[in-house]
Amino acid sequence: MRIATWNINSAKARQARLIEWLDRAEPDVVCLQETKLSDEAFLELFDEDLFRRGYRAAHHGDGRWNGVAILSRGTLDDVVRGLPGGPGFPDPEPRAIAATCDGVRVWSLYIPNGRAVDDPHYAYKLTWLAVLRDVVAAEAAHGPLLALGDFNIAPTDVDVWDLAQFEGSTHVTPAERAALAEILGVPLVDVLRARWPEDIVYTYWDYRQLAFPKNNGMRIDLTLATPDVAERVRAVWVDRAARKGTGTSDHAPVVVDLDHAPDGDVGPMVPPPSARTSSGRASSRASSASAAGAPRQP
């Protein structure tokens, strides 16, 4: 089973890019964030394209800034929309959706940004993460689970291109990282970092200041798994090809394959960046660059 997460940053604006990517990458399960569509609008926009490709879809959105979805070519059972018991700002927002896909409980998550450390949204973010920890812990006790999505947290300093640029900002504060550590303590495994413990890996690059070609990014889109699922992982990579060109999201998909390792092992960013970062750190090693989204090996 190939599972991916992607903050699409407007499913309507990225419709053609998403369909093109589904055909290339061939994921079995896709978690989307920031769709910015209502449930009705999402189904109207994608229903035929997804049906033709064998996907069922569950969406949770109100047409504004949030919105999450799960697409599955297998089962899509026991759907839960929203974070049970989660806080609102002031009302609960469509930032979480869960479904059971071929025996694995899958959560598509769009954690609040936090905005600034002195903003009420930051306290909201920390409370939201605490509730998520409890929800995930309860579900993980009953079977295999994946929590995927845009966490809006860089887990460690190595997950940020230049920490000095974020001094005093959200995404890197000790409180946010402590909240993430409590979720990992469920326990969950950060499967990308487990596979690529020392590599520079980013999933998000700002649209401004040539951040993507300079590889000035952050790793904030995470793939967390219970140990039984993590043991099945054969490959995990960031599909940078989906970030290239015009009309793209500012995030790239993260892909986890539980069955096959394209070209033996692919990652961590495919294709790899070609230049050093402005901080002088070397870019990720070039490994099997052509294999991103490659069809499954027989």
Image (cartoon, helix red, strand yellow):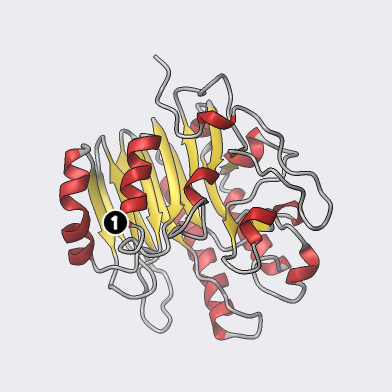
Total marks in image: 1
Task: Give the position of the N terminus as an image quadrant.
Answer: top left
Q: Is residue 165 above or below residue 201?
A: below
Instruction: Identify the residue at horizontal 21%, vertical 37% (top origin).
Output: 54
Tell me, yes or no, if residue 141 can be seen here: no
Question: Local crowd at mark 1 within 10 Å, few (<14), some, or many (≥20)?
Answer: some
Residue 148 can be seen in this image: yes
Query: Callout 1, which amino acid?
Result: Val
- Is 6 situated above or below 272? below
Q: Quadrant of residue 179?
A: bottom right
Please tell me which residue is depicted at 43% across the width and 75% down the height of the picture. 87
Which sits in the foreground, 139 or 50? 50
Of residue 66 and residue 294, the one placed in the foreground of this image is: 294
Residue 177 vertical placement versus 64 (above, below): above
Q: Position of residue 228 (x, y in %)?
A: 50, 31
- Of all residues shown, which one is farthest toward the front? 246
> From the viewer's perspective, is 186 left or right of 83?
right
* Residue 70 pos. (x, y %): 32, 50
- The percent coordinates of residue 167 (x first, y second) are 77, 73
Q: Residue 162: which quarter of the image?
A: bottom right
**Is 164 situated above or below 227?**
below
Q: Secondary structure at mark 1?
A: strand
Which residue is the extreme one toward the top? Answer: 298
**Which residue is at a point 56% across and 85% down the rendered structure image?**
120
Quadrant occupied by the C terminus: top left
Q: Nearer the viewer, residue 178 or 111?
A: 111
Q: Judge left or right: residue 298 versus residue 49.
A: right
Residue that mark 1 sits on: 80
**Quadrant housing residue 286:** top right
